[in-house]
């Protein structure tokens, strides 16, 4: 007889997405923000999260509200970039047949003496 024990997080897609972001993250600041959202999704109150993560309750509320409004992208340090990108998106969709994106890679040569 095989007994499977599932963590309640295993079935929650949002929690899994946050855990993946935590694993792939390299920034301590972003790690803290992801942890706030993880605790929020697990049902903790903002005041409890603030105490656990040593943050101000308003800061926790801001992170949670940004997450609710923009998803994980709302937690990035520069929210202005996301906001402007969303404003430009309709223009890009309308003109995609006329636009071409070209990447230029800079070639750096090492001089040996």
Image (spheres, helix red, strand yellow):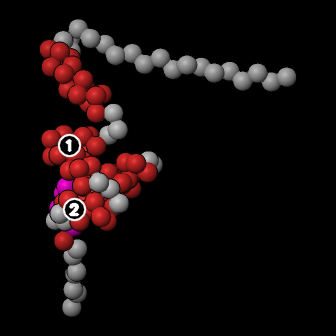
**Outermost residue toward the top?**
98
Find residue 34 and report its horizontal and vertical position in percent: 31, 53
Q: Alpha-carbon distance for marks 1 and 2?
A: 17 Å
Magenta-drawn stretch, dominant element (helix, strand or loop): helix
Q: Is residue 1 visible?
A: yes
Find residue 20 and report its horizontal and vertical position in percent: 32, 55
User: What's the magenta region?
Assistant: 9-14
The answer to which image quadrant residue 22 occupies is bottom left
In this picture, is 63 found above or below 13?
above
Residue 100 falls inside the magenta stretch: no
**Outermost residue toward the right?**
113
Residue for badge 1: 66
Element assignment for label 2: helix
Residue for badge 2: 47
In this picture, is 34 found above or below 110?
below
Residue in the picture at 22% in, 80% down: 5
Element assignment for label 1: helix
């Amino acid at each position: 007889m095989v007994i499977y024990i599932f963590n309640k997080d295993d079935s929650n897609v949002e929690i899994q997405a946050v855990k993946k972001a935590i694993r792939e993250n390299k920034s301590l600041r972003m790690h803290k923000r992801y942890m706030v959202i993880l605790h929020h999704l697990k049902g903790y109150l903002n005041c409890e999260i603030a105490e656990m993560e040593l943050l101000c309750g308003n800061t926790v509320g801001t992170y949670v509200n940004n997450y609710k409004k923009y998803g994980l992208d709302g937690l990035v340090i520069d929210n202005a970039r996301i906001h402007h990108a969303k404003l430009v998106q309709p223009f890009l969709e309308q003109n995609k047949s006329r636009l071409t994106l070209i990447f230029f890679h800079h070639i750096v040569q090492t001089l040996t003496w």
